[in-house]
Image (spheres, grey):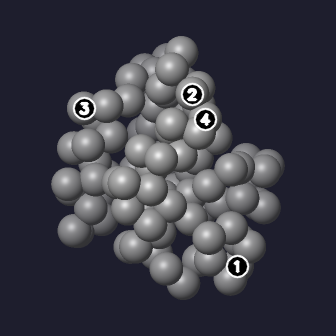
Amino acid sequence: MVSTTFLSSKYYVGKTDGWYPAWAYYWEEPETDVPGLKDIAAFQEFMRQHPKGFFLAERKRFHETPGVYQDVAWVEANLRKIEEASNEDVVVYAWGQ
């Protein structure tokens, strides 16, 4: 499982395997003790290493952050949105399912 920050590895959803986009929220690494996925290439490599997974994206931290629009477009084009698990605060995506 990958999540955005504020849904990070120790607090809200239990242990996650990574968080994204680390380039936009670099200061979160010391708090979470997880280095994060720095860019789309790192996310793609994570997906290769983990053939099935979920990405939990907090809307304010992912969809509404200036400068992240290219990342949002990539996620929406390459992962499947799970409507029944998403709400106004969090969007759940899956790959390899």
Instruction: Kindly tell me whether residue 77 is visible in this rendering.
Output: yes
Give the quarter of the image for residue 32: bottom right
Query: Given this view, does label 3 or label 1 mark the residue nearer the observer?
Result: 3
For label 2, the residue is 51
Label for residue 63? none
Location of the C terminus (image quadrant): top right
| Rendered view: 8 above or below 43 | below
Q: CA distance from mark 3 to mark 2?
A: 17 Å
For label 3, the residue is 77
| Dot 1 alpha-carbon crowd within 10 angstroms: few under 14, some 14 to 19, many 20 or more | few
Query: Given this view, does label 3 or label 4 mark the residue nearer the observer?
Result: 4
| Rendered view: 27 above or below 71 | below
The kind of secondary structure element at disc 1 is helix
For label 1, the residue is 31
Label for residue 50? 4
Q: Amino acid at mark 3?
A: Ala
Q: Amino acid at mark 4?
A: His
Mark closest to the chain's N terminus, 1 or 2: 1
Residue at 50% across, 61% down: 37
Q: CA distance from mark 3 to mark 4?
A: 18 Å
| Dot 3 alpha-carbon crowd within 10 angstroms: few under 14, some 14 to 19, many 20 or more | few
Query: Given this view, does label 1 or label 2 mark the residue nearer the observer?
Result: 2
Q: Amino acid at mark 1?
A: Glu
| Rendered view: 58 above or below 22 | above
Location of the N terminus (image quadrant): top right
Left/right of residue 11 with respect to residue 4 in the rendered view: right
Q: Are marks 4 and 2 in contact (CB under 8 Å)?
A: yes
